[in-house]
């Protein structure tokens, strides 16, 4: 091979470059990377030693996975002061991670697996061709049709044979009224003051979704609604309805405690039931399951009186405060314990003055405003100065 003088000079330069520069062996390479670019980093570099300037739980899990896959990892170092804030922050993150896994294991051990079942000639068979929500609705329709045909002897009843439910017009923002109509119910939309659904003259149901339940408990609106239902109906129920494909629980199993806590939904529901013993709570996993519940509640029940359901509770608001009552006595009445915006007009219609209210008996107050409010008002008026 012939090299001229210029090529010979370049060859000397390249030899000198290879002598002082080049690709280092993997054992002598030091790479510095932030945690934000950690995805795929360990697989591409395949380090034997790792030094972590700040412990990061997510990157530690990547290192564990990297070592599990047979990587040539020898040592991992943490640069952190003993008993420092950084160390406590890392230990707290590890503890929260462990508690989350334990909670997930407990919930999974008690998880209910929904099975869509369809009625056939040979009994109950599991159907996987339709969704669980549609299966529940089909089961409700089939069950209602079967009972109507059995009880009346007719395969296809007229409009008068369809079970009737009076529904508050504000409930039509939810899918339940449409599902009830699809299941064969006669849905009568009306503006009703007490309850959301009136199944018969003795039963009213207040439906609450989870967000509405939390808001009603915090504002106290649910307390007034429960008081009105228990005062006007023999059977009052609170329907707590969950969404489809959501966890059928108010709180995680690990978050339920035996102590009464002001901010806990379970504690607030327990206090609500203690205040109104006749109030029943119905749990529904979805609007489709609510249809099945209504089918059972409507079995062998008389149809509701629509006019009576509409008029129920309107007598409490028949008289306007500004038109008849004086402002000062009304303000004094509303400031008394147990008196609120829903029952002060009942007291104002019955008694002519505050003096007459002070002389009322406990039994009279119970009939007018309910036992809980009557107890607060009566004890306050009879308290010694």
Image: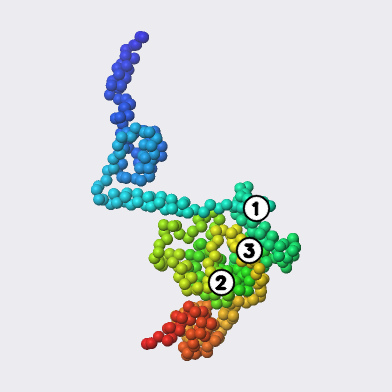
Question: Which residue in the structure is indicated by mark 1?
Answer: 123
Q: Look at the image and tell me in which quarter the C terminus lies.
A: bottom left
Q: Residues within 10 Å of mark 3 (few under 14, many from 20)?
A: many
In front: label 1 or label 2: 1
Q: Residues within 10 Å of mark 2 (few under 14, many from 20)?
A: many
Is residue 320 visible in the rendered image? The answer is yes
Q: Which mark is residue 295?
A: 3
Indicate the position of residue 165 as horizontal and vertical percent values: 64, 68
Distance from disc 3 to disc 1, alpha carbons, whole Å, reads: 20 Å
Contact? badges 2 and 3 (CB < 8 Å): no
Helix, strand or loop at label 1? It is strand
Helix, strand or loop at label 3? It is helix
In front: label 3 or label 1: 1
**Residue at the left extreme, as displayed:** 82
Question: Which label's residue is closer to the chain start, 1 or 2?
Answer: 1
Question: Which residue in the structure is indicated by mark 2?
Answer: 236
């Amino acid at each position: 091979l012939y090299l001229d003088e210029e090529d010979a000079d370049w060859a000397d330069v390249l030899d000198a470059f290879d002598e002082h520069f080049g690709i280092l062996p993997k054992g002598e390479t030091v790479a510095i990377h932030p945690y934000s670019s950690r995805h795929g980093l360990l697989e591409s570099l395949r380090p034997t030693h790792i030094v972590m300037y700040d412990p990061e739980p997510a990157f530690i899990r990547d290192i564990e996975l990297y070592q599990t896959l047979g990587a040539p990892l020898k040592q991992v170092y943490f640069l952190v002061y003993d008993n420092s804030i950084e160390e406590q922050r890392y230990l707290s993150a590890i503890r929260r991670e462990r508690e989350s896994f334990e909670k997930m294991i407990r919930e999974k051990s008690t998880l209910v697996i929904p099975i869509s079942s369809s009625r056939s000639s040979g009994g109950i068979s599991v159907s996987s061709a339709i969704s669980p929500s549609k299966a529940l609705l089909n089961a409700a329709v089939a069950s209602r049709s079967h009972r109507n045909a059995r009880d009346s002897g007719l395969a296809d009843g007229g409009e008068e044979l369809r079970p009737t439910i009076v529904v508050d017009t504000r409930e039509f923002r939810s899918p339940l009224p449409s599902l009830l109509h699809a299941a064969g119910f006669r849905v009568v939309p009306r503006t009703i003051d007490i309850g959301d659904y009136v199944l018969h003259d003795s039963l009213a149901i207040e439906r609450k979704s989870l967000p509405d339940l939390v808001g009603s408990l915090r504002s106290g609106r649910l307390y007034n609604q429960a008081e009105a239902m228990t005062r006007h109906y023999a059977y009052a129920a609170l329907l707590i309805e969950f969404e489809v494909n959501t966890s059928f629980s108010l709180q995680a199993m690990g978050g339920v405690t035996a102590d009464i806590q002001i901010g806990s939904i379970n504690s607030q529901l327990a206090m609500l039931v203690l205040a109104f013993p006749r109030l029943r709570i119905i749990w529904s996993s979805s609007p489709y399951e609510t249809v099945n519940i209504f089918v059972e509640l409507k079995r062998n029940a008389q149809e509701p009186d629509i006019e009576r359901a509409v008029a129920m509770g309107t007598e409490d608001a028949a008289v306007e405060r500004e038109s008849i009552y004086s402002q000062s006595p009304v303000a004094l009445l509303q400031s008394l314990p147990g008196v609120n915006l829903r029952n002060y007009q009942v007291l104002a219609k019955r008694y002519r003055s505050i003096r007459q209210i002070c002389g009322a008996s406990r039994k009279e107050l119970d009939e007018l405003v309910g036992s809980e409010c009557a107890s607060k008002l009566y004890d306050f008026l009879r308290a010694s100065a």
